[in-house]
Image: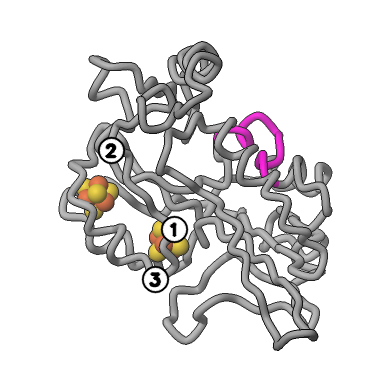
Amino acid sequence: MQRDLQRALAKPMRERKWGMVIDTRKCVGCSSCTVACVMENKLPPGVVYRPVIDTEVGDYPNVTRKFLARPCMQCDSPPCVSVCPVGATWKREDGIVEIDYNACIGCRYCITACPYQARTFDFGENWTDPAATGKDGALALETGRRYQTEPSFEYGNEWTRAEGVIPRSPVGNARKCTFCAHRLQAEMLPACVSTCIGRATFFGDLNDPRSLVSELIARNNAVRLKEELGTEPKVYYLV
Ligand code: SF4
Ligand code: SF4
């Protein structure tokens, strides 16, 4: 995957099409990817970019659990973009759907328009708030304060959630998975891909026939969510 990444980054941006493949048969539901994403993007309570949805299927005693990691699909025809009244969200040349936190007015139209529930809203809550710290408050306060004053680097910019720094802050804005665009810029795979203990998440350039993701989606067990909507998701699942 690292070689695929380097090959893609050597091309002009418009010739790349980033995509992700998640093998549902290998996902063990550990949520390492969810946590890695929270750490990477300094996400506050209530803002999750990559939940792992846990469902139980079958009838007792023949039951099993299925796990579905659900990042933003970075749709090729993204319904979240056209509804934005201020043009604060758009699809980049490489297919990543971006949000400009300085332009977003927090109307949340895009959150309603997304058929995958991939966008959440940053209400300005912090891990050190009383509701979040609970009875282990002292430790949470110490580590939480340090964590929440560190900037995130989404879309290659520096964003700080500390009070009083608006507008250079995502507080009061829609937020979502970025495929770790800032890490890609530095030739690093998305945090969820690097941390997946089941080796169930793959990433690369869908325009490159030699990439691992292209090879995986050519198989007949690759599916996309809600294909009938015509959103053209760039996240595929192996089933
Ligand atoms: S999954 Fe939702 S937020 Fe992501 S591009 Fe598609 S419509 Fe937009
Ligand atoms: S919440 Fe922000 S990005 Fe979403 S539609 Fe409103 S202004 Fe646009």
How many numbered marks, from 0 up?
Answer: 3
* Residue 188 drawn above or below residue 112: above
The yes-or-no answer for disc 1 within 8 Å of ligand 1 is yes
Whether residue 186 appears in magenta in the rendering, the answer is yes
- Using residue 237 as the reference point, say whether residue 70 is left or right of it: left
Q: Amino acid at mark 3?
A: Pro
Q: Which secondary structure lies at badge 1?
A: loop
- The CA distance from mark 2 to mark 3 is 21 Å
* Magenta span of residues: 182-192
Q: Position of residue 57 (x, y in %)?
A: 67, 81
Please state which of the two labelled residues, at mark 2 or mark 3, is closer to the viewer.
Answer: 2
Q: Amino acid at mark 2?
A: Phe
* Residue 14 drawn above or below residue 138: below
Where is mark 3, residue-wise? 115
Determine which quarter of the picture holds residue 211. Answer: bottom right
Q: Position of residue 190 (x, y in %)?
A: 66, 42
The yes-or-no answer for disc 3 within 8 Å of ligand 1 is yes
Q: Which secondary structure lies at badge 3?
A: loop
Q: Nearer the viewer, residue 128 or 90?
A: 128
Say the numbered circle drawn on residue 118: 1
Where is mark 2, residue-wise? 123
